C-alpha cells in the first residue's frame, strides 16, 4: 500500500511540475556579461535605393540671397531644361500649394533637383547627399553658404508575427537595428520565440534570410541583420505552445480544464487503489 502511495505522489509531482515549469528561453541577452565590450563589426547606415523618397531642406544664413534664389527658381522658365520649377523655399522644394514635396529616387538612382538637374544619390547616406548638394550649389554660385538637411520620407521596415504591435515601422535615423524595430513594435509577446527571429531582405534582386537569437547577445550583435535596411521584414516565430493552440487537438493540453480533469481522474484512481 505504501508503494502505491509513493507512486501516486510521484505522478502528482510530475504533472504539477510539467504544468508549472518556466521556460528558460524567455529572457533576452542571457550571456550579456560574457560579451561585454564586444566591438561591433560592419556598422551599416541606411543608403538610398531606387524608389526611396527624401525631403531636401535648403536654408541659408543670408535670407536675401535665399529669397533671390527662390524667386528665380519660382518664376523663371528654364528653357534649357524644358520645364518650370516650383519654388525652393527655406523649407525645401515646395509645390504650388507651398507644402514640402518629396524627391523620389528613380530607377537610375537619380533625383531631379531644381536648377541643378539630375543628381545621382543611389548608395549615398543622407549626410553624403546633403554634402553633395551643398557643394553643387556653391560651385554654381547659387547659394553662398547653404545649409542642407536631408530627411527620410518612406523609409521603414515591417515587423510581423508575435509582437504586440505588428505592422510598418517608420525609420527616421541612419542606424536602425533589430532592437529598434522590436521596441517600436511593442516588444515580443510571451508566445514569441526569442531564439528564432527571422529577417528577410532583398539584396541585388535575391531574397536573403537571417536568423537571430535574442537570448544570445553575441549572436545578435554579430548578425548581418543587426542593422536593418529599408524594406526589411522582421518575423517573430510563434512558440510551439502557440502553434499547438492553433489546432483543436493540441489546444486541450494547454487548458486549465484538461489538468483539472486529469487531477480528478488521478484522485479517483488513488481512492480505488487505497480501498
Image (spheres, rainbow, N blue to C red):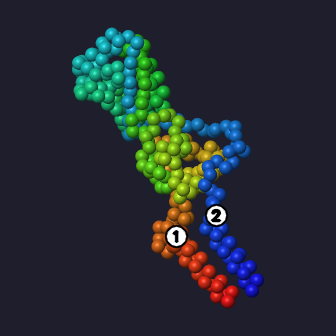
Coordinates of residue 52 in the picture (x, y in percent): 40, 38
Residue closest to the eye, 19 or 264: 264
Q: Which quarter shows the C terminus?
A: bottom right
Which class describes the residues within 10 Å of circle 1: few (<14), some (14-19), or many (20+)?
few
Earlier in the chain: of badge 2 and badge 1, it is 2
Coordinates of residue 26 in the picture (x, y in percent): 61, 55
Coordinates of residue 72 in the picture (x, y in percent): 27, 16
| Residue under label 2 | 21
Whether 182 is drawn above or below 258: the answer is above
Q: Residue at x 32, y 28 (%)?
A: 100
- Whether residue 126 sits left or right of residue 3 in the image: it is left
- Residue 233 in sight here: no
Residue closest to the eye, 48 or 218: 218
The extreme right residue here reads 2
Q: Residue at x 41, y 16 (%)?
A: 146
* Secondary element type, mark 2: loop
Per the rendering, the mark at residue 255 is 1
Q: Which quarter shows the N terminus?
A: bottom right
Amino acid at each position: 500500500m505504501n508503494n502505491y502511495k509513493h507512486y501516486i505522489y510521484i505522478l502528482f509531482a510530475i504533472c504539477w511540475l510539467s504544468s508549472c515549469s518556466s521556460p528558460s528561453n524567455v529572457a533576452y541577452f542571457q550571456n550579456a556579461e560574457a560579451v561585454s565590450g564586444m566591438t561591433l563589426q560592419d556598422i551599416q547606415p541606411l543608403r538610398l535605393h531606387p524608389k526611396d523618397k527624401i525631403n531636401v531642406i535648403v536654408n541659408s544664413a543670408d535670407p536675401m540671397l535665399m529669397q533671390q534664389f527662390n524667386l528665380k527658381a519660382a518664376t523663371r522658365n528654364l528653357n534649357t531644361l524644358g520645364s518650370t520649377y516650383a519654388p525652393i523655399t527655406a523649407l525645401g522644394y515646395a509645390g504650388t500649394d507651398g507644402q514640402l514635396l518629396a524627391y523620389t529616387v528613380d530607377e537610375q538612382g537619380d533625383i531631379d533637383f531644381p536648377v541643378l538637374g539630375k543628381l545621382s544619390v543611389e548608395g549615398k547616406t543622407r549626410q553624403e547627399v546633403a554634402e553633395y548638394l551643398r557643394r553643387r550649389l556653391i560651385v554654381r554660385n547659387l547659394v553662398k553658404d547653404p545649409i542642407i538637411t536631408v530627411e527620410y520620407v518612406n523609409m521603414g521596415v515591417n515587423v510581423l508575427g508575435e509582437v504586440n504591435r505588428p505592422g510598418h515601422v517608420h525609420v527616421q535615423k541612419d542606424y536602425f537595428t533589430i532592437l529598434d524595430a522590436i521596441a517600436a513594435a511593442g516588444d515580443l509577446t510571451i508566445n514569441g520565440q526569442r531564439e528564432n527571429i527571422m529577417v528577410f531582405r532583398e539584396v541585388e534582386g535575391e531574397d536573403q534570410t537571417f536568423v537571430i537569437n535574442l537570448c544570445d547577445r553575441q549572436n545578435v550583435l554579430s548578425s548581418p541583420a543587426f542593422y536593418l535596411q529599408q524594406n526589411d521584414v522582421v518575423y517573430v516565430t510563434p512558440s510551439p505552445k502557440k502553434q499547438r493552440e492553433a489546432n483543436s487537438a493540441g489546444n486541450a493540453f494547454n487548458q486549465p480544464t484538461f489538468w483539472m480533469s486529469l487531477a480528478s481522474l488521478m484522485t479517483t484512481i488513488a481512492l480505488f487503489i487505497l480501498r
